[in-house]
Amino acid sequence: MLKELIKPFQYKYLNLTNNKKKNESSRAKNVSSTINRIWNYLAIMKGKLSVVLFLVFASSVLGLLGPVLVGYAIDHYILKNNLNGLSLLILSLVFIYIGYSASLFLQNFWMIDIAQNTVTKMRTELFNMFHKLPMSFFEKRQHGELMSRVTNDLENVSSTLNTSVIQIFSSILTLIGTISVMLWYSPILTLLTLSIVPVLVIGIKWITNRTGQLYKIQQRNLGELNGFIEETVSGQRIIKTFSQEDKMIRDFLGKNEKLKNSGFWAFIFAGFIPKFMNVLNNVSFAIIAGVGGYFAYKGHISIGTIVVFTEYSRQFTRPLNDLSNQFNTLLSAIAGAERVFSIIDEDIESIDESHIINDQKVIKGEVEYKNVCFSYGNDSNTLTNVSFKALPGESIALIGPTGAGKTTIVNLLSRFYRINSGDILIDGVSIDHYSRENLRQQMAFVLQDSFLFKGSIRENIRYGRLDATDKEVEEAAKLANAHSFISKSANGYDTILQQDDQQISQGQKQLLSIARAILANPAILILDEATSSIDTITEIKIQEALQRLMEGRTSFVIAHRLNTIKNANQILVLKNGMCIERGTHDELLRNEGFYFDLVMHQGMNEDQHIQ
């Protein structure tokens, strides 16, 4: 009957572990290396850590002294009915246990401080790493899964460091001290007590082999679920638009079920440890009580020795129990720490300072592409031998079918990716000779999806240049045609916006993005579908703002509306990653090529898309 009840759960457990083995190793790839790295973080606070370890040693010694004095009191005072000096011994016991309690409190207090500083440093390094990683890293991962590294995984490390480091050292010292005192009192009873160790080792190894796998599976499933939830919350409009609520709920239930199963079995196996240790503890107690009673009856040992041994038998199994429990917790923390270190160890955007000619060079805006080829890592090129030149102040329109390479061209210009071959020159100098920071500070982006941070309207505009005055912020808003709706807001420029706030329209968000770009005063401007999905009236305001923004700046415009691109100095027509036509609007129409066909196919209405 019991076997039938367990069978479905056993199948789920086997399915979890088998799937994990197919994809990757279930254990941490390098446990010793991960522990060593965590220890290096802890060692930063050597002084306080040394005090904590001393207090751990002191509490272990004081904990061992108590039973010895109790046994001495029984043999030399109570059984002999001699009360002289007993009060002094009792007073000594009081001070020992007070000292024991005080050392426990202080070591925990200071260890929490060390642990929190350690995790804070790890979290800071991880967050800083996010800002050093290339865009390709984020494009391959769910945002929620990355957030899980900063929150869940590090919180797991934090809770473990708060208790486990002290517990492990204390348990080891207590174990060594206990065995030493037990051997001094009675080697035979000590050997009988140690007889449970082989059973303990075999049992704990069997359990931890499974918990080690399951804790890592649990962390992975938790990260996947967090990523899915973040994606679902961000995509609510699309989900509701296409009535896919039921599908998302089914997908959530599947991922939630996986997390439940991995958590269920992780805790099931981890829960075996205290029960297993309790059985061994009772067996050890029974052995000592039975054999010790027989030895006392024969006069080989005293009653006090039996009392000491029964107390120490519990002290012997308690640190073993603690070590076993902490080992499980430690495995979980190592799994979390390894996930954190895997991000910290990622390759950052390569920076070769030897090529940088002038980190403060002011860009005029001349841009030239020379036979640029690029691939995202697959076999086919996204761009093939793209060449063109833009003079300072010119506007370059990029058009072509989806996947033609329009966005890739501007991504390469801003050094989000490195070209495979060819060269990109700015003011006659290869972009590799500019630092990324200097290059991007002199560029501004107005994208299709305007991103606003949580904060006031003023702070969101000032993001373009943090040292701008309030007056400069407002002037930028006026040039962007945003001042009117800002003034009508509840608190004007101090109105607080939430990320993806719905209290302002998409067009108004776009105007704030343009104001941000105007405030940045860039030499090079990139407009990627800046007027897409905007109503006609708002588009007029945006077009006016964009004309002011583009004046005197080298601009790259990705758009499909004819009225957005027809006045460009150059129009580059892309297809399959190659520039097949270039020229002004009138020149391309006269050539009657691909561009001409696009325009004629869509009609000459300026509001029409020409893709």
Image (spheres, rainbow, N blue to C red):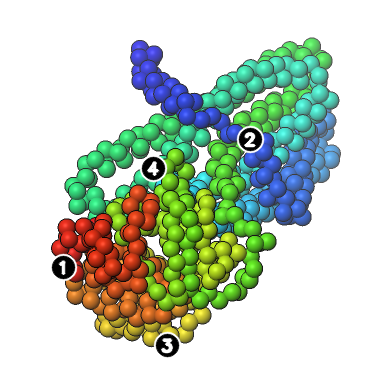
Tell me what residue is drawn at x 30 percent, y 38 percent.
Answer: 251
Tell me what residue is drawn at x 42 percent, y 42 percent.
Answer: 380
Q: Using the image, tell me which numbered label, if any, was put on residue 62.
A: none
The answer to whether any part of residue 227 appears in the image is: yes
Tag 2 residue: 31
Q: Using the image, tell me which numbered label, if any, was put on residue 225.
A: 4
Question: Label 1 near label 2: C-beta < 8 Å?
Answer: no
Instruction: Depth check: give the residue in front, 427 or 543.
Output: 427
Return the disc, 2 or 3, that comes first in the chain's sequence. Answer: 2
Q: How many marks?
A: 4
Tell me what residue is drawn at x 61 percent, y 30 percent.
Answer: 324
Label 2: few (<14), some or many (≥20) within 10 Å?
some
**Quarter the C terminus occupies:** bottom left
Question: Label 4 near label 3: C-beta < 8 Å?
Answer: no
**Amino acid on which disc 4 is placed:** Leu
Return the disc, 3 or 1, that comes first in the chain's sequence. Answer: 3
Tag 1 residue: 605
Return the disc, 1 or 4, that comes first in the chain's sequence. Answer: 4
Asked which secondary structure carries label 4, the reply is helix
Tag 3 residue: 471
In this rendering, is residue 302 above or below 575?
Answer: above
**Amino acid on which disc 3 is placed:** Lys
Q: CA distance from mark 2 to mark 3?
A: 56 Å
In this rendering, is residue 318 above or below 531?
Answer: above
Q: CA distance from mark 3 to mark 4?
A: 46 Å
The image quarter containing residue 513 is bottom left
